[in-house]
Image (spheres, helix red, strand yellow):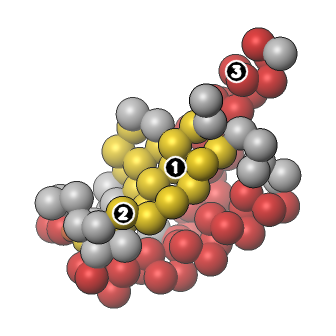
Amino acid sequence: MKIKLILCMGSSCYARGNEDNLDLINRYLEDNNLSEYVDFRGQLCCGDCQHGPVLHIADEKIVDLDSSSITKILDESLMKLVKQRVDKK
Ligand code: FES
């Protein structure tokens, strides 16, 4: 099963940065050839607008997502999970 990566595309998160974050994440996944391991999708408002923009990486909820730190977050949280999948093969 692929790792679920879910970006909140509700109007609040979208306006507060997830429009740009969407592009950054897509580019990251492409640059690192992660389509085999990651199921990236958007979702409607997850009810945490005051802490948005929101991103879910598997069971982890990232709040106040900032485009300047997104690569670091993906490197640390997502790539750790990807590495576990690769090691199991
Ligand atoms: S719009 Fe993202 S939590 Fe509401």
Residue in the image at 83% along x and 53% along y: 32
Closer to the N terminus: mark 1 or mark 2? 1
Residue in the image at 36% along x and 80% along y: 14
Name the image quarter holding the C terminus: top right
Q: Helix, strand or loop at disc 3?
A: helix
- Where is residue 58 shown, x and y percent of the image? 46, 37
* Left or right: 32 in relation to 5: right
- Where is residue 37 shown, x and y percent of the image? 71, 39
Is 5 situated above or below 2? below
Mark 3 neighbour class, 10 Å CA radius: few under 14, some 14 to 19, many 20 or more: few
Between circles 1 and 2, the one closer to the viewer is 2
Mark 1 neighbour class, 10 Å CA radius: few under 14, some 14 to 19, many 20 or more: some
Q: Amino acid at mark 3?
A: Gln
- Where is residue 33 shown, x and y percent of the image? 84, 52
Q: Helix, strand or loop at disc 2?
A: strand
Q: Where is mark 2, residue-wise?
A: 43
Q: Are marks 3 and 1 in contact (CB under 8 Å)?
A: no
